[in-house]
């Protein structure tokens, strides 16, 4: 009998085979040698069953059937990957031991546990727990395999997380959807994240812009010149500001106080996943999901970075030697060779607490480059790799050194403050010398303080005599406006999720709150993507703006009296409790008992809530310009679209663009209506109405309304490929559908398919040629691949992936 090794994905399985048994034979779905059989899970092979697995009545969404709280949760195989599950079952019969080689984290543990439970595997289990996929690390990991029982608490936490999410999501979504006749997605993590965005949007809209005046002077003492900002209560009267300028211009002043001190700036912390996602969003505009996918490819496919789904910014003593080895490897990379030559290994050692802090490393250390040479990286992969390498290299350099001059200048009894930061030595900042305009921002502060804005950084010597008079050579009053809170970007939202919604500027406090954040580093990106998919948020450039549907969802949930569902802090506490379960410090049974109580409370509260009007879900998110104009008029920007003229707004114009799939178990007619939704959303609004189409829950095709004459006259993208249809394919917000949806055509191609965002050109090519051009895609396991999309079914628009 042999030992069966179950990896999380094929690439990992092949890496393991190459490291421990390079002569093993490849059988496509598994690799077999004399001692080991190595196979893989392709992500989640098994999930929790839908409600109708417990009772047929749950096929229809009925409020009176709630809550749904199974005594024991049933497991079901993913139909897309059921063949691979059978492979594992057959291989297990030929094995007497198992090795769990899934990702070393909560979700990897969960994937293996579900396979083990569903297939009723009783084999002894060992755990491979590693942070990179280099052959040396894999071999060392197998030499140091852990007992599977050591991870029982992690398994309990993973199961509790999964079942808690099922209870809140299934019951909350069904309750609010059936009560208000609108598809409303509710989730244990996604709903409080939505509430964070809602609250920020309300702050922005309620903000009243006001003008004020900064008075800035330029002083001279011999050859020395420096700027100073007037110190006093904020000036809102332009006459007062101008009077101050007239009073002080050309006058002599004196140095009231002059303080000089030497300071040092140390390198920023090594990356955890959230910090990497934040910087990639700020610098390159990458979404959180895109950064995660790129980092995962660098880890699994290229093996040039360590495990990316980490929440630690530190390493342990055992990692120091590997860091030194990785530094040596970078010497052969032309992009970094000069920087490596000037690096000092002695700066990275076990007593350097800015790097080595074992107490702050739980499952995985900070993200590091490995000692494998990077080659054949895509441009986007190179961007992420470069961020990681430069942050890594910075710790082998000395701190940057400054002489900070703080001056209070007095003129006619008026005080001006100056802060001059004189660079003495660049130190680690030489790493970013070629990116002067793109300085790293991740110390933890999102915006500069007033004091920082008044700071002047110079690289030339600065000398000032404290006892010698100065002259106010220039002075001016600058008109400024108060600024509203900033809209969230994906980067700043990730920071808010990590701090459970709190604006945590203090790095130490933020570090302490990591265990009570919203979601985990591995799941935050998917939460943001989910909010986009269900139509709760829209992107305006980098900014995230909450749509009307998202606004109403938050208001209904809070209005029902279940504020806990929208509470970032409380949900953060739940996440902390899951971490405590994983460490054996809390009971999973007690946690689940509380979740079940809360599920019952949700149903009780929604039952007595008044039904929302249809119009409450209509209207687009406000444009940034419109909101600003409204604030300047002193009014709160509502973000709702203007109402259509009486009699002009037909039901067809209110119908959905391509929305989330219809609820599981809903009628065929309802499921078919998603195609109608796409087509209806592409219809033009009535002339002069100003009414924007809004994403709505799928409805029956008859409710979507007919195509307008204007729409029928439009050429569309291509002829509908459904045999005998005769319609044209037109674009909606989330997909491409047929103008003949009312006649029963269910053809739909979703814009976001296999990780690609399909353009009109790509869809036309796909329909007319049967496949797209070669492109970057994501396979069923979530791995980045190169291939083509093919039209598998011209009647429905079903797509497939071809890699040849």
Image (spheres, rainbow, N blue to C red):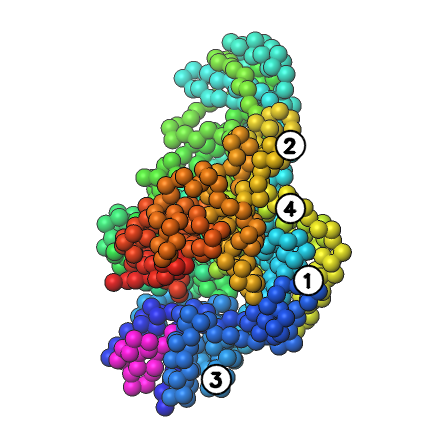
Residue 51, compared with residue 378, is above or below; it is below
- Residue 345 visible (yes or no): no
- Label 4 to label 3, Cα distance in Å? 51 Å
Q: Position of residue 254 (x, y in %)?
A: 55, 17
What residue is disc 1 on?
A: 63
Foreground label between 4 and 2: 4
* In magenta segment, residue 299: no
What residue is disc 2 on?
A: 636
- Magenta part of the protein: which range? 24-40
Q: Position of residue 244 (x, y in %)?
A: 59, 13
Which residue shows up at 59% across the image and 68% down it? 59
Mark 2, secondary structure of its residue? loop
Residue 516, compared with residue 474, is above or below; it is below
Which residue shows up at 62% across the image and 77% down it? 72
Q: Report the side of 676 relative to 374 (left or right).
A: right
Foreground label between 4 and 3: 4
Q: Report the side of 325 relative to 217 (left or right).
A: left
What residue is disc 4 on?
A: 614
Q: Quadrant of the N terminus?
A: bottom left
Check disc 2: other Cα within 10 Å, few if <14, some if 14-19, many if 20+. some
Nearest to N terminus: mark 2 or mark 3: 3
């Amino acid at each position: 009998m042999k030992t069966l090794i179950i990896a999380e994905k094929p690439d990992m399985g092949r890496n393991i085979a190459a490291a421990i048994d390079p002569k093993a034979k490849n059988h496509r779905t598994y690799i077999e040698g004399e001692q080991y059989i190595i196979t893989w899970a392709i992500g989640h092979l098994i999930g929790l069953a839908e409600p109708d697995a417990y009772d047929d009545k749950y096929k229809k969404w009925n409020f009176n059937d709630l809550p749904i709280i199974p005594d024991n949760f049933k497991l079901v195989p993913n139909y897309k990957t059921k063949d691979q599950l059978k492979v594992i079952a057959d291989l297990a019969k030929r094995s007497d031991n198992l090795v769990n080689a899934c990702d070393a984290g909560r979700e990897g543990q969960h994937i293996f546990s579900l396979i083990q439970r569903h297939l009723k595997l009783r084999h002894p289990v060992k755990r491979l727990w590693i942070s990179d996929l280099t052959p040396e690390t894999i071999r060392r990991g197998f030499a140091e395999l852990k007992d599977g029982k050591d991870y029982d608490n992690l398994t309990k936490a993973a199961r509790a997380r999964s079942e808690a999410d099922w209870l809140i999501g299934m019951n909350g979504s069904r309750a609010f959807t059936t009560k208000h006749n609108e598809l409303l997605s509710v989730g244990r993590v996604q709903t409080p994240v939505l509430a964070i965005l809602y609250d920020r949007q309300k702050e922005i809209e309620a903000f009243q812009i006001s003008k004020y005046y900064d008075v800035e002077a330029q002083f001279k003492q011999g050859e020395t010149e420096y700027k100073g900002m007037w110190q006093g209560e904020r000036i809102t009267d332009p006459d007062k500001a101008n009077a101050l300028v007239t009073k002080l211009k050309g006058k002599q002043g004196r140095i009231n106080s002059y303080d000089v001190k030497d300071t040092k700036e140390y390198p920023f912390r090594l990356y955890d996943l959230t910090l990497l996602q934040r910087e990639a969003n700020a610098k390159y505009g990458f979404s959180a999901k895109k950064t995660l996918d790129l980092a995962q490819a660098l880890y699994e496919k290229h093996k040039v970075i360590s495990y990316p789904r980490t929440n630690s910014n530190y390493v342990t003593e055992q990692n120091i030697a590997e860091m030194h080895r990785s530094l040596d490897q970078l010497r052969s990379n032309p992009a970094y060779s000069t920087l490596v030559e000037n690096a000092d290994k002695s700066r990275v050692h076990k007593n350097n607490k800015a790097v080595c802090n074992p107490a702050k490393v739980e499952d995985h250390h900070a993200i590091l480059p490995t000692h494998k040479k990077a080659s054949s990286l895509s441009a986007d992969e190179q961007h992420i790799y470069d961020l990681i390498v430069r942050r890594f290299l910075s710790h082998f350099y000395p701190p940057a050194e400054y002489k900070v001059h703080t001056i209070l200048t007095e003129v006619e009894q008026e005080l001006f403050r100056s802060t001059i930061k004189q660079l003495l030595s660049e130190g680690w900042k030489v790493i970013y010398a070629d990116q002067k305009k793109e300085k790293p921002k991740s110390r933890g502060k999102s915006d500069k303080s007033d004091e920082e804005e008044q700071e002047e950084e110079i690289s030339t010597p600065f000398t000032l005599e404290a006892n010698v008079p100065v002259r106010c050579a220039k002075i001016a009053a600058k008109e400024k406006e108060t600024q509203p809170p900033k809209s969230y970007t994906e980067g700043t939202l990730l920071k808010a999720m990590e701090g459970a919604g709190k604006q945590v500027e203090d790095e130490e406090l933020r570090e302490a709150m990591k265990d009570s954040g919203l979601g985990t580093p591995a799941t935050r990106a998917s939460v943001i993507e989910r909010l986009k998919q269900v139509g709760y948020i829209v992107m305006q450039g980098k900014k995230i703006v909450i749509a009307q549907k998202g606004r109403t969802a938050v208001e209904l949930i809070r209005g029902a009296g279940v504020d806990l569902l929208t509470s970032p802090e409380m949900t953060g506490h739940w996440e902390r409790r899951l971490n405590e379960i994983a460490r054996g410090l809390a009971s999973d049974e007690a946690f689940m008992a509380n979740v079940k109580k809360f599920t019952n409370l949700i149903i009780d509260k929604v039952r007595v809530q008044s039904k929302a009007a249809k119009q409450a879900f209509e209207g687009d998110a406000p444009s940034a310009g419109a909101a600003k104009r409204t604030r300047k008029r002193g009014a709160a920007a509502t973000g709702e679209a203007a109402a259509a003229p009486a009699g002009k707004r037909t039901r067809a114009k209110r119908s959905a663009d391509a929305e989330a799939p219809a609820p599981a178990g809903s009628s065929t007619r309802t499921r078919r209506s998603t195609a109608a939704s796409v087509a209806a959303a592409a219809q033009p609004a009535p002339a002069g109405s100003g009414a924007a189409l809004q994403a709505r829950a799928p409805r029956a095709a008859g409710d979507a309304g007919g195509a307008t004459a204007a729409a029928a006259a439009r050429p569309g993208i291509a002829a509908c490929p459904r045999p005998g249809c005769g319609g044209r394919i037109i674009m909606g917000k989330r997909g491409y559908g047929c103008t003949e949806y009312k006649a029963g055509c269910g053809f739909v191609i979703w814009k976001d398919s296999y990780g690609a965002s399909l353009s009109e050109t790509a869809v036309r090519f796909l329909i007319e040629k049967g496949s797209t051009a070669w492109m970057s895609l994501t396979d069923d396991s979530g791995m980045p691949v190169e291939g083509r999309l093919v039209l598998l079914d011209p009647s429905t628009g079903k797509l497939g992936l071809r890699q040849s």
